[in-house]
Image (spheres, rainbow, N blue to C red):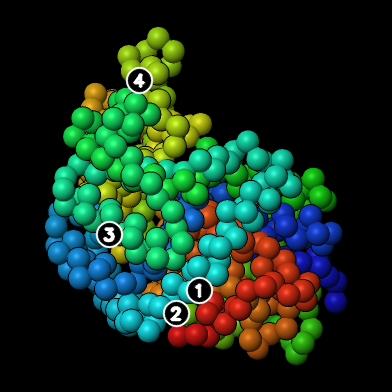
Amino acid sequence: MRIDSEVIVVGAGLVGAACAARLALEGREVLLLDMQAPGLGASFGNAGHVATEQLIPLANPRVIRDSWRYLLAADSPLVLRMAYLLPILPWLARFVLAARPGALARGVAALMALQRTSSDDLRELLQACDLAPLLSLDGYLRVWESDAGARAARRQAAEVAAHGIRSEPMPAQAIHAEAPALSADVSGGLCFPDTGHVSDPHAVCTGLVAALQRQAGRVQRARVLELYQEGRGPVRLTQAHGPALHARQVLVCAGAWSRPLARSLGYRVPLDTERGYHITVPWPGAGEPGAGAIAMRRPIASTERSVIMTPMSVGLRMTGTVEFGGMHLPPDPRRYALLRRQMQALVPGLHTGAASTWMGFRPSLPDHLPVMGAAPRHRGVFFAFGHQHLGLTLSGVTARIMGALMQERASGVDLSAYRIDRF
Ligand SMILES: Cc1cc2nc3c(=O)[nH]c(=O)nc-3n(C[C@H](O)[C@H](O)[C@H](O)COP(=O)(O)OP(=O)(O)OC[C@H]3O[C@@H](n4cnc5c(N)ncnc54)[C@H](O)[C@@H]3O)c2cc1C
């Protein structure tokens, strides 16, 4: 049987591109497949926040307590599309189970095991791929506009401080000196100095793909339909158009689309999507009204509004919203309108008329841990998907772990918490 490549990676989002680049840098022959151009999935429009402070899985008692209130509010950051109520119910039931104290403690430990090196791994990978200028590791600000917001932000910071995450108080004056365009209602905040951001996640993704190609790796447009393995032989991938492809090792990194691929080998996994939205306001040109005034050097998150704004090369981006609506319902225009209102409230006078809009599919398991590891019943098949709100942040550590695993080296991380058959 003809082997098309030693390794085939399915999915050229941040996770797949990082893994493919890493494997190629380590001398492996790699073919990266995607049904569309690289980086157009969830990785295209994320907030670009290297969120190393996020250690508490979203499946936690506070979110569950608040979510009933959120789900019914029109301007809520968390919404459930009624047309998707029935399909998401089993996922939500597992989400509630994952928030029980024992499960949550295991979830925190499992996220910590990845976050411990996530920033270093991302920095090293981007350096090795000549992409270091896209990454800034100089923190982000979490601000508030009310006493209740201050209490909530401090409580959340205290939760992660117990696990070693540093934050520093930022008085209002210092915040406004750093970001003069910010609303006068912002009355204080915290700086998380060990976090960072990228100037354009799509550029990171395409840059990783370019680095793969410089190492003689190949990229091909292909929609993979199924994986199949005869005995312990090579893995066969059937594609929508064109002949089947064969590889000795296959790594599935198809983000929110990974479920049918895992299923084709007999692995059932409760992967769903938490849809998220962004608007990106292009920077005003020199001489235009507002030019220079909205300068911002690092991300700013609003506690009360559950949004984050990131200064990017393409403009000022605001992201927010968790929407349960599956993969097929169209975007809800009210979500964009909400983001516009939030942006105008936080940066008064900013014109959002020219903003571009986007919705993407966060790949999420109910316990908010990724699937990472070798397929239990198939030799040469590996999975790395389900990175939920943290796919950029965890792309470097995922690539390092998968690189080690696929070359039978120790990764230094106990992978049992991320097994595909843990549910
Ligand atoms: C609004 C929003 C804000 C976010 N902010 C942040 C943030 O600040 N920091 C952070 O760390 N994370 C953030 N995230 C999460 C992050 O974007 C995702 O976790 C990450 O992009 C997932 O990457 P991925 O490579 O797994 O998936 P994707 O980027 O979705 O890539 C999967 C790829 O697989 C391809 N594919 C799918 N099926 C097939 C198939 N059958 N055959 C071939 N190709 C296939 C798709 O075309 C796609 O290119 C955010 C997400 C959203 C939506």
Q: Identify the amino acid type marked 1.
A: Ala
- Mark on residue 106? 2
Q: CA distance from mark 2 to mark 3?
A: 21 Å
Percent x, y of residue 157: 34, 57
Q: Residues within 10 Å of mark 1 (few under 14, many from 20)?
A: many
Q: Nearer the viewer, residue 5 or 14?
A: 14
Q: Are marks 1 and 2 in contact (CB under 8 Å)?
A: yes
Q: CA distance from mark 1 to mark 4?
A: 42 Å
In percent of the image, x 33 and y 40: which residue is there? 170
Q: Is residue 50 left or right of residue 402?
A: left
Queried on whether the Cβ of the residue with tag 1 lies below 8 angstroms from ligand 1, the answer reads no
Q: Identify the amino acid type marked 4.
A: Ala
Percent x, y of residue 361: 42, 58
Q: Is residue 303 left or right of residue 20?
A: left
Q: Are marks 2 and 3 in contact (CB under 8 Å)?
A: no
Q: Is residue 124 left or right of residue 102?
A: right
| Residue named by callout 3 | 155
Q: Is residue 202 left or right of residue 146?
A: right
- Mark on residue 110? 1
- Mark 2 or 3, nearer chain start: 2
Q: Secondary structure at mark 3?
A: helix
- Mark 2 or 4, nearer chain start: 2
Q: Identify the amino acid type marked 2.
A: Arg
Q: Secondary structure at mark 2?
A: helix
Q: CA distance from mark 3 to mark 1?
A: 22 Å
Mark 2 or 3: in front is: 3
| Residue named by callout 4 | 293
Using the rendered image of the protein, determine whether residue 47 is visible from the camera's viewpoint. no
Question: Where is residue 137, by image quadrant?
Answer: top right
